[in-house]
Amino acid sequence: MRGRQVLMQSLVAHGVDSIFGNPGTTESPLIDSLAEFPQLAYYVALHEGVALGAASYYAQASGKPAMVNLHVAPGLGNAIGMLYSAMKANSPLLVTAGQQDTRMRLRAPVLSHDLVAMAAPVCKWSVQVERADEFAPILARALKLAQDPPSGPVFVGLPIDVMEQETEVAPAPPSPLHRAGAADARGIEQLAGLLLASERPAVVAGDDVARAGAGEALLRLVERTGAAVWWEGLRARASFPTGHANARGALPFDAAAIAKALGDADCVLLLGGPFFEEVWFTPGSPFPPGVKVAQIEEAPERLAGNFPLAVGLAGSLAGTLAGVAGAIERRADARYRAAAARRNAAHRLASEAEAAAQTARLQKNWDRQPMSMARAMAEIRAGAPADAIVVEEAITASADLAKTFRFDTPDSYFSGRGGGIGQGLAGALGIKVAHRARPVLAISGDGSAMYSIQALWTAAHHDLAIVFVVLVNREYRVLKHNLDTYRQRFATRSNRPYAHMDLARPALDFVALAAGMGVAGTRVEKADALAGAIARAVASGRPHLVEVVLEAKR
C-alpha cells in the first residue's frame, strides 16, 4: 500500500473522525484519498488559523483527537498562533502539513522550509515522515503522545513523494492503555488529613478536572469540606458548577492579587492545571502567608513546578478526588462536619450577596445607550435556550457574562487559554461539529472577531447552525484597561489618549461582512430588542450573526 493509505487507515484505527484544514498542492494525496474514507469528515477553512482553532475546540468538546491539515511553511506559519493556544489548552491534536518532494530538498523549492523546527516550540513532538515505512509507527506514537497527560498537539510533516511511496508496514492499531489509577493510598490519606486540619480550605480547579470527568468527585469533596472553589482568569472549560454556592469565580492575573483573592485560606488544593497564567509581575507568592499548598495532577511533571507543596499526588483526578473525599467521610467527626456545614452556609451568603450586587449593577446601567455590558449579557441570556453551549471570547465583558450565565456542566462552556485572540469564532465551529444537537452561541468582542472572521464562511459552507454574537464597542477595550494599569504600575504619568486602540474609522460592519460569507445577520442597537434577536437567530436553524452595539471606554 502507499503511504497516504497508511495515513488514512491509521486515523480511522485510532478513532479520528474529523479533519480540519485548508488544502494546497502538497496536500493533494490526502484530499484525493478522502473519497475512499467516508468515515473521515473534512471541514474546510479559508485560513489555517481558523482550521486549527476549530480542531482544538473540537478535541476539547468531543474528547477525541482531531487532525489538522495545513499547507507547507506559510500555512503552518499562519496557524502557529492558534497552535500556541491549543498547546496552552492541552488539546490533543495531530497537526500535519504537506511538504515538498524530498528529492528537491537541496534546491529550496517554493513554499518549503524546515517544518519540524517551525512547529517544535509549540508541540509535544515534531517530526517529518522520511520514508513510507515510517508512517505507521510515527502515527501510532504521535496519536499516543497527543493524548498522554498533559495532552497537547503533535506535528507530523508529510512530504508529497513519501505519501506516494509503497510500504508493507501496515497501520498499527491503538494499544489499550490504562494511563493512571488513583494516587498512592498514603498520599490520599495525607491529603485528607491536611484538609481535615484546615479551617479555611480553598480549591483552584483547572481545566483537567473537566477533561478527566472528575467534576462529580470534586463536588463531593467540596461539599464535605466546605471549601471555596476558584479557577484561573483564563480557562478552557467549566470544571466546577458556576451556580454552586461555593464557587467564588475567576482569580486575577498577578501573584499579589491572587493571594488577596484567596484571602485567609489556610489550605489551597490545586487540581489539574499549570498554575498560574499571570499578566503582570508582582513580587512574592500567589498564596496567603502560612498557607499549606497541595496539588493533584495526572502528569507528575506538573507537581511542585513553581512552588513547594505540603503534599503532591500523581494519579487520575477522578479516582484520587473520590479517594480523598471517601477518606474525609470516614475520618470526619461531628465537630468537623459541623464546621464544614458552617463554611458552606457562609459561602451561600457570599454567593447571594454577589448576585445582589450584580442585580444592582444591572439596574443602575439598565437604560444606558449604547447599552451596557451588564444589560447585554442579561438580554443574551434571556434569549438563549437553556441547553445552549457558550463559546466565550468576550474579553472585557467576561466578568458580566460570568455573573449572568450559569455553567453547571463541563460541556456548557468553552473558552481559550494562552491569551491569543481570535479563538472564539473559530472554536465555535469545532464545538458545533462535536455537539450537532445543541444550540451554540459564540460570544466575541469585535476586535477578536476580526482575527478569524473567515469562520463565518465555514459555518455557512458546512451548514453549522451557530449564533455568532459580536459585541461591538469599536475599540480594543482591554488594551485601554491594560494601558491604564501599565501607567500605574510603572509610575508613568500620562494624560495621552489611547493611541491606535480605536476601531471606529472606518466602522466595521459585521452584518455586511457576514452577508458576504453567506451568513444572515442582525444589528441590535436597542437593548430591549436583543433577547428577541438571539431567540430568532437560534430558531432559524442556520448560522446567524448578531451584532450588538455596546458602550465604549473613552
Image (cartoon, grey):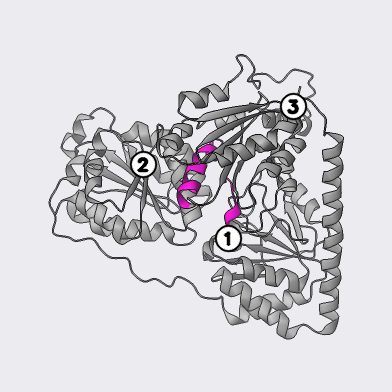
Is 225 situated left or right of 180 in this image? right
Q: CA distance from mark 3 to mark 1?
A: 34 Å
Amino acid at dot 3: Glu
Residue in the image at 50% along x and 54% along y:
61
What is the secondary structure assignment of the residue under circle 3?
loop
- The image's mark for residue 551 is 3
Magenta span: 411-434
Residue in the image at 74% along x and 31% along y:
527
Q: Which residue in the structure is indicated by mark 2?
A: 117
Q: CA distance from mark 1 to mark 2?
A: 32 Å
The quarter of the image holding the N terminus is bottom left
User: In which quarter of the view is residue 227 placed?
Assistant: bottom right
Residue 244 coordinates in the image, percent (x, y): 74, 60
Residue in the image at 54% along x and 70% along y:
316
Between discs 1 and 2, the one toward the N terminus: 2
Queried whether the magenta region covers residue 420, the answer comes back as yes
Marks 1 and 3: in contact by CB < 8 Å? no
Q: Above or below — where is 159 with respect to 66?
A: above
What is the secondary structure assignment of the residue under circle 2?
helix
Q: Above or below — where is 496 with respect to 344?
A: above
